[in-house]
Image (cartoon, rainbow, N blue to C red):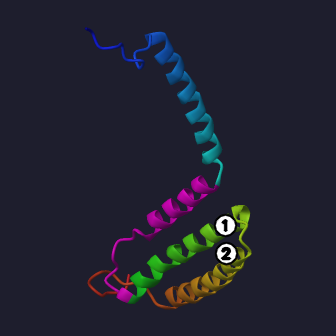
Amino acid sequence: MQPPALPSRRSPRVWMGLAAFVSVAGASSAIAAADGFDARMAEAMTRMHHAMMLPPSGDPDRDFAAMMIPHHQGAIDMAKVQLQYGKDPRLRRLAQGIIVEQAQEIAVMQQILDEAPATHPQGHPQ
């Protein structure tokens, strides 16, 4: 007695049609996601991480401020995306506060960087 044929065996034509359907469905959702919340957040984080990757100057204070400015700007960028897409009023208020507070902190750190001359890693002014 032979076992019954498995119902999962389908012709190559059926599999090709199914693959084409999945491909089109995936592409349309990828296009929607490329313009949406996830893509905008990923862009903000990528910009932030890239801008934070600075070579050490040898001055911990200067390095801290120079790296924290893009970190705070990333928080501002992400908060703006939240305001564009988010609906929760508590998170929207939080995002608005992040924008104000982080901008103020960026201004303080930038002022400190502008006041202090940059130094080489050996500690000599440039």
- Residue named by callout 2: 91
- Please give the name of the residue rendered at 58% of the width and 83% of the height, measured from the top-left corner: 106
Front residue of 120 and 19: 19
- Residue 89: quarter of image: bottom right
Label 1 crowd bin: few (<14), some (14–19), many (20+), radius 10 Å: many
- Residue 11: quarter of image: top left
Kindly identify which numbered label has been placed on residue 121: none
State the SS at label 1.
helix
User: Residue 85, relative to residue 79: is it above or below?
Assistant: above
Counting labels gives 2
- Residue named by callout 1: 82
Residue type marked 1 = Gln
Outermost residue to the front: 1
User: Residue 14, relative to residue 60: is it above or below?
Assistant: above
Front residue of 30 and 6: 6
In the image, the segment drawn in magenta is: 37-60
User: Which numbered disc, 1 or 2, marks the residue that appears first in the sequence?
Assistant: 1
State the SS at label 2.
helix
Tags 1 and 2 touching, CB below 8 Å: yes
Q: Is residue 64 magenta?
A: no
Query: Could you say where residue 43 lies in the image, as x and y percent from the top left?
Result: 55, 57
Q: CA distance from mark 1 to mark 2?
A: 8 Å
- Please give the name of the residue rendered at 72% of the width and 63% of the height, measured from the top-left corner: 84
**Magenta: main secondary structure:** helix
Query: Could you say where residue 26 lies in the image, as x and y percent from the top left?
Result: 56, 35
Left/right placement of residue 57 relative to residue 45 reads left
Residue type marked 2 = Leu
Q: Is residue 52 magenta?
A: yes
